[in-house]
Image: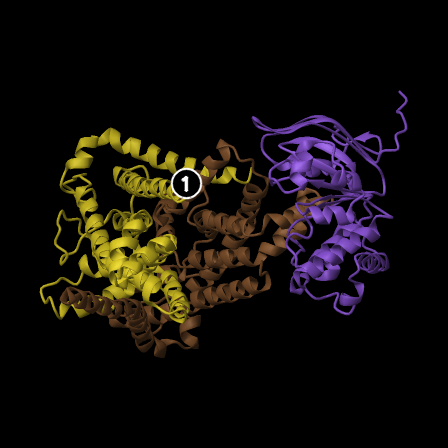
Chain colours: A brown, B yellow, C purple
């Protein structure tokens, strides 16, 4: 009898170490990855790298064009997706009637959030690039990414709105406020932290996307800076992919340096989002 | 009105996939599409069997899940039953970071870090293979499995825990004999969603798996997945309206069907699960 | 058409309420005089809160809500199509069971009701804040901290802020749905004291499950049971000499 109990305790203890190991595994992998990237690519980061155009020689090639493209894409996508997504979220959560159409839309959005990003690329290829004739432009790319992150923003907005207690709404109505006044003056300010966090995370996801943009034809090799939304463009992730496909060691180093830049942007955005979320959660202790 | 956009998007996706694929399917019978064992639409000798792409997708996804499930579930169990609260607070941001890394970057790790590492153990392994991106995809989806499973475990009523501990069971026994089965629907949901994610993943495989469609379960050789095929064609010069062009939509519809079915199975399970506890 | 001048502040006639198939208020008629405190008592689920919420039409938001009968305030049917519900609610204030201040400063909480009417003149707002907080007997405690978050106050203080917020829009009727049930005894007695003081300027209807409280604060008591109004009389009478046996049983604690 006691022998069985001892075995159980040994297994229990072993699993504890296994659990810690698994947990640290993720940390370990992250550490190894960051180390490999930084060690290889850090030295390549210099002013020349940031400001150069593409070149056949890796030492001369730089990320100016893709970096510009990423910035442009970030701005355009935000301009399209944020108002549309937040407004839809507010509408669905506050004004929507709880009927079959509403639940159909909800299922629809949840499904869209799970569709692989490359399929958005196919959709965009047909509709934006071909049928609407936008070509492989910045505008087409931004529209594609906007559609991709729209479900994320809608869901995040709805969750933030849901978190506001019903009692706040009741108090507002009881004072004679209209639905719009209640939404604008009470619900939105109270949920703004959650909405902003969700939006930032969505944008961060958008600038890391590669596949849909490749499908619509974002160029791997362009030589001029895009100056209007209708121009050809490239973004950082695509440039990284391009460089990784080349055999020369020099390009691999370039790729790692570009990765450092991309990761920095991603981490800064995510960091801001998490910081804002913590501050918001402290401020509105229900 | 605003929400109509989401309906439009779905309609748009379906329309595009179906319209292009239907042209494709007028030229290639669907039985050949489903059952031919070679995929060579870009070569002179054209075959249009999607099975090699499907096995490529399945192989990489299976490797990913077999890495992510044990580790992710163990993390969930550990955090739920063993870990002190401070540890959990420390770990959550790390997992969030893992989930936020762009997939191109993961692709780099697969190609430049994991593959050479594995080649030390398997010297015959090709530079492009299925094992390396599979493992890295697994690492990428660990946060998904661990956080969803953790929520599922957390939702199990305390009374079950207390009953088990009260009889003298260890934490390990309680976790795996009582809690995990009780939370099984939530855990299964997390696994299915993780599979769906792996199936739809493009860049990690595009960078590290090569582009040779092969009907194989050998993880050491290059393969092509549905997603990387689409990338391959998009990178090249393919004439619009040609059958090569339409193949990417045929591939797309296969991919969409796969992920759609997986996602909706998980939604269905999740709904039934919620009913049980209410 | 000449409307008969009625002295009643509120007159309800043969009111029935249905939530889908459930018949939750059955044929209730009641008349309430101005500047009185009326208590609605009865066991859980008897309909007293539902009836209260009819008065400021908060039930409008519930799916499946249907009503027959009429409710007149100052002689006007409040469910008339021409009535704008927002205007109605400015005449009728409501204090809820759990204090629900907005997550904003004390000052902003009080002036919200004015801001939504478009009033933005700072001196008007300042004056309203002071007047309302004084009437709610909390001015001295918070006058130096008007910009502090209302959530930082204690439960009893928050509830008095909510009362002040309600008074700021100058309603004529104040509805209170178990206003002290979530508070400690000291805060409760402060609120009861407040009700006493407010009576001179407002008509108050308070729902309470605490019979001693009903006895302490109200002029008249309405006893509800399973959606029906069983008895409605002067407070003293209902407690000392109830006319219905059901009332007697409830008051002596036989049930509920």
Q: Quadrant of the C terminus of chain C?
A: top right
Q: Would residue A242 be visible to someone looking at this image?
A: no
Question: Picture coordinates of residue B76 (x, y %)?
Answer: 32, 60
For the point 68% across and 52% down, which residue is it? A185
Q: Residue furthest top?
A: C1
Question: Vertical placement of C21 versus A87: above or below?
Answer: above
Image quadrant in which you'd find residue A252: bottom left
Image quadrant in which you'd find residue C41: top right
Q: Chain of mark 1?
A: A
For the point 37% across and 63% down, which residue is it? B101
Question: Picture coordinates of residue C83 (x, y %)?
Answer: 77, 32
Question: Picture coordinates of residue B55 (x, y %)?
Answer: 18, 47
For the point 32% across and 66% down, which residue is it? B82
For the point 17% across and 58% down, which residue is it? B129
10 Å crowding of disc 1: few (<14), some (14-19), many (20+)? some
Q: Is C170 on the left or on the right of B121, as rendered? A: right
């Amino acid at each position: 009898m006691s022998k069985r109990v001892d075995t159980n305790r040994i297994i229990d203890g072993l699993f504890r170490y296994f659990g810690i190991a698994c947990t640290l595994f993720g940390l370990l992998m992250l550490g190894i990855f960051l180390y490999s990237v930084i060690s290889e690519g850090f030295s390549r980061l210099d002013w020349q790298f940031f400001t150069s155009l593409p070149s056949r020689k890796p030492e001369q090639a730089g990320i100016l064009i893709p970096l510009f493209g990423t910035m442009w894409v970030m701005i355009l996508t935000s301009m399209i997706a944020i108002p549309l997504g937040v407004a839809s979220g507010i509408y669905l959560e506050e004004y929507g009637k709880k009927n079959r159409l509403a639940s159909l839309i909800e299922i629809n959005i949840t499904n869209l959030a799970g569709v692989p990003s490359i399929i958005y690329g196919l959709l965009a290829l047909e509709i934006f690039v071909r049928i609407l004739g936008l070509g492989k432009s910045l505008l087409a790319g931004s529209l594609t990414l906007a559609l991709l992150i729209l479900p994320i923003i809608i869901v995040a907005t709805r969750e933030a709105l849901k978190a506001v207690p019903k009692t706040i709404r009741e108090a507002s109505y009881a004072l004679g406020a209209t639905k719009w006044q209640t939404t604008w003056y009470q619900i939105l300010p109270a949920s703004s932290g959650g909405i902003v966090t969700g939006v930032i995370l969505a944008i961060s996801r958008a600038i890391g996307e590669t596949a849909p943009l490749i499908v619509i034809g974002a160029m791997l090799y362009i030589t001029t800076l895009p100056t209007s939304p209708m121009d050809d463009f490239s973004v950082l992730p695509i440039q990284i992919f391009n460089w990784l496909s080349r055999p020369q060691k020099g390009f691999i180093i370039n790729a790692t340096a570009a990765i450092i830049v991309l990761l920095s942007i991603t981490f800064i955005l995510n960091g801001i989002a998490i910081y804002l979320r913590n501050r918001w959660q402290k401020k509105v202790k229900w | 009105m605003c929400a109509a956009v989401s309906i439009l998007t779905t309609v748009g996706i379906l329309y595009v996939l179906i319209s292009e694929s239907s042209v494709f399917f007028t030229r290639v019978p669907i039985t050949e599409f489903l059952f031919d064992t070679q995929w060579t639409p870009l070569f002179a000798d054209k075959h249009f069997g999607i099975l090699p792409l499907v096995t490529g997708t399945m192989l990489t996804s299976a490797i990913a899940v077999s890495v992510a499930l044990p580790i992710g579930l163990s993390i969930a169990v550990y955090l739920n039953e063993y870990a002190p609260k401070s540890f959990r607070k420390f770990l959550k941001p790390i997992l969030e970071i893992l989930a936020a890394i762009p997939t191109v970057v993961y692709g780099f790790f697969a190609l430049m870090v994991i593959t050479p590492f594995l080649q030390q153990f398997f010297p015959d392994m090709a530079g492009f293979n299925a094992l390396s991106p599979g493992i890295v995809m697994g690492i990428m989806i660990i946060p998904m499995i661990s956080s969803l499973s953790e929520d599922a475990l957390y939702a199990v009523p305390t009374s079950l825990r207390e009953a088990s501990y009260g009889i003298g069971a260890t934490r390990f026994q309680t976790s795996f004999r009582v809690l995990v089965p009780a939370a099984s629907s939530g855990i299964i949901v997390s696994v299915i969603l993780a599979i769906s994610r792996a199936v739809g993943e493009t860049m990690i495989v595009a960078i590290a798996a090569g582009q040779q469609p092969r009907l194989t379960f050998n993880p050491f050789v290059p393969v092509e997945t549905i997603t990387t095929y689409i990338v391959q064609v998009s990178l090249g010069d393919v004439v619009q309206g040609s059958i090569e062009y339409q193949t990417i939509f045929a591939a797309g519809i296969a991919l969409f069907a796969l992920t759609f079915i997986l996602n909706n199975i998980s939604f269905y399970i999740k709904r039934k699960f919620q009913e049980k506890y209410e | 058409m000449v409307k008969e001048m009625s002295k009643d502040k509120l007159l309800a006639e043969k009111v029935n309420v249905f939530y889908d198939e459930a018949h939750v208020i059955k044929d209730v008629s009641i008349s309430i005089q101005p500047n009185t405190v009326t208590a609605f008592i009865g066991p859980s689920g008897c309909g007293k809160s539902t009836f209260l919420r009819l008065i400021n039409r908060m039930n409008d938001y519930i799916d499946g809500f249907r009503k027959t009968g009429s409710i007149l305030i100052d002689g006007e049917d409040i469910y008339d199509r021409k009535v704008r519900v927002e205007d109605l609610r400015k005449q009728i204030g409501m204090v809820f069971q759990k204090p629900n201040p907005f997550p904003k400063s004390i000052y902003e909480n009080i002036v919200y009701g004015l801001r939504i009417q478009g009033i933005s003149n700072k001196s008007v707002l300042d004056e309203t804040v002071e007047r309302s907080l004084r009437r709610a007997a909390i001015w001295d405690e918070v006058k130096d901290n008007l910009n502090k978050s209302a959530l930082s106050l204690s439960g009893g203080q928050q509830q008095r802020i909510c009362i002040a917020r309600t008074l700021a829009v100058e309603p004529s009727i104040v509805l209170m749905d178990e206003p002290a049930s979530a508070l400690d005894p000291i805060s409760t007695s402060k609120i009861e004291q407040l009700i006493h003081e407010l009576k001179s300027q407002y008509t108050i209807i308070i729902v309470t499950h605490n019979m001693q409280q009903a006895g302490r604060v109200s002029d008249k008591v309405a006893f509800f049971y399973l959606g029906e109004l069983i008895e409605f009389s002067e407070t003293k009478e209902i407690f000392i000499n109830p006319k219905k046996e059901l009332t007697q049983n409830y008051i002596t604690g036989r049930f509920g």
